[in-house]
Amino acid sequence: MTTESPTNGTATGAQAVNNNPIIVGLDIGTTKIAAIAGRKNEFGKLEILGFGRANSSGVQHGMVLNIDQTIKAIEQALQNCYASNPNLEINEVYVGIAGHHIKSLQTRGDIVRQNNEDEIAQREIDQLINDQYKTYIPAGDQIIDVIPQEFTVDNFQNIPNPIGYSGVKVGANFHIITGDKNAIRNINRSVEKSHLKVKDLVLQPLASAAAVMCEHDLEAGVAIVDIGGGTTDLAVFYEGILKHTAVIPFGGENITNDIKMGLGVLRTQAEQMKVQFGSALADEAKSNAFITIPGIRGMAPKEISVKNLAHIIQARMSEIMDFVSYHLKQVGLDNRMLNGGIVLTGGGSQLKHLIQLTEYVTGLNARIGFPNEHLAPGHIDELAKPMYSTCIGLILKGYNVFENTQNKLKGIEVKEETVAEVVNVYDEQTDTHQVRVKKRKSLKGFMDSIKDGLIDLFNEEEDRKL
């Protein structure tokens, strides 16, 4: 039996136990494509109602290169999802986007207010943000997202939300994320030709961050490192603000290829050795341990040293972590300024001794981030693995959009919960000290800052051409 999906729903399923819609996340990765359907229960936790995955083909380094092969993999993942719950009917999906074409830059914007006696209004903030879409970027790229970091009003700085303040000038620092137009269109076409509607595109590092972070991580400062098959995604937060994003063009596939070339084995054998016997620290591998690989077409079996295997893995993982350190230095957040350290997630984070290597290379504490923070009890154990962080995060973003839309329809203004800090500020103009409450964004505030309607940017451009 099926029921009508609730307003803004993305799927229909068994008889609804609440009014929340079923949201579906679709993670199109280099090594796998995963489709997960979930719905929030009365406690605000995600109940997983359907799950399917398929081996990915047609995707390299997070970019769709062969649309036909990608469509087949998406359809296979959907079939497996339907097999787990035959009552599902999936129509709309939230899709993750990554790839080495994703870039970011920092900009600064200011406007002088026409009437400085009035309180700052939302339209002025919207104008400030919209002005950033005029920022010059290379031809062929598209501004995907403009995320405000902290605002300033005259002499007052580090204001997360200036609405209600008054002053002559209001400005902000912005984190701008860009991507290649063709790469984004290929993702869109692959999904639509699989008979699905793209509800929205969400940057994979931000989706993964939402799945594995909590309020304490956001406050303490943390770097989310999502090690996927084709790329490693980085999102850095400090004092509740998204400070930096980056896509490092190396991932688990590079390690597999290194093993294949370095040890002279088949790719499937290299992948199996990496998963079963691989270590990110050669010093931790036993020097007297060997792996016997069957010979090809009657050739003699080959013995592989576990220590040699670890040396190959360590070399590539050290390179990835060097990139992480480089990006942290670029934004001035190395030297233990991130109290929350580094959170490793994604399929590549399951390598043995990776935490120790990460701490050694970066000098920061590290841990594995699991997406079970937001999952209801009784979920499939498989889904608590780091490789599904992006997909769970996509569902969370879908619910963030749904809840904001519902509140607007009801006329409810939801005040964002923040971490407050009372500071004493000296005002030069009045020669007085004023007590101000400095607030840092909550996890919901971070989710709100991710661009809603990202896919509309590209649909509008296609319409203009027609």
Image: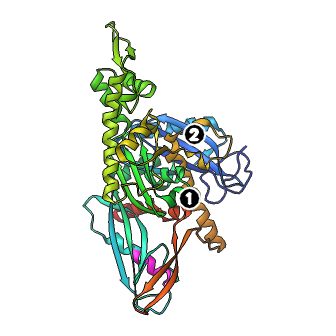
Q: Please give the residue where the numbered disc 1 appears in the rendered image.
A: 215
Assess disc 1: are there few (<14), some (14-19) or many (≥20) residues with their C-alpha within 10 Å of its C-alpha: some
Within 10 Å of disc 2 (Cα), the crowding (few <14, some 14-19, many 20+) is some
Q: Say if 111 sits above or below 253 in the image.
A: below
Q: Magenta includes 111?
A: no
Question: Which mark is first along the chain, 1 or 2?
Answer: 1
Quarter placement of the N terminus: top right
User: Can the viewer see residue 195 in this picture?
Assistant: no
Residue at 34 percent of width and 33 percent of height: 314
Element on which disc 1 rests: helix
Q: How far apart in space, not on screen, are marks 2 and 1 (Cα)? A: 22 Å
Residue type at mark 1: give it: Glu
Residue 124 visible in the snapshot: yes
Percent position (x, y) of residue 205?
43, 51
In the picture, measured across the screen, residue 144 lies left or right of residue 401, that is left
Q: Magenta span: helix, strand or loop, mainly?
A: helix
Image x and y of residue 339, in percent:
46, 55
The residue beneath circle 2 is: 383
Q: Taking 203 as reference, is 402 left or right?
A: right
Residue 174: x and y in percent read 38, 68
Q: Which mark is residue 430?
A: none
Q: Is residue 125 magenta?
A: yes
**In percent of the image, x 32 and y 69: which residue is there?**
107
Residue 125 is drawn in which quadrant? Answer: bottom left
Most foreground residue, 142 or 107: 107
Say which quarter of the image contains residue 349.
top left
Q: Secondary structure at mark 2?
A: helix
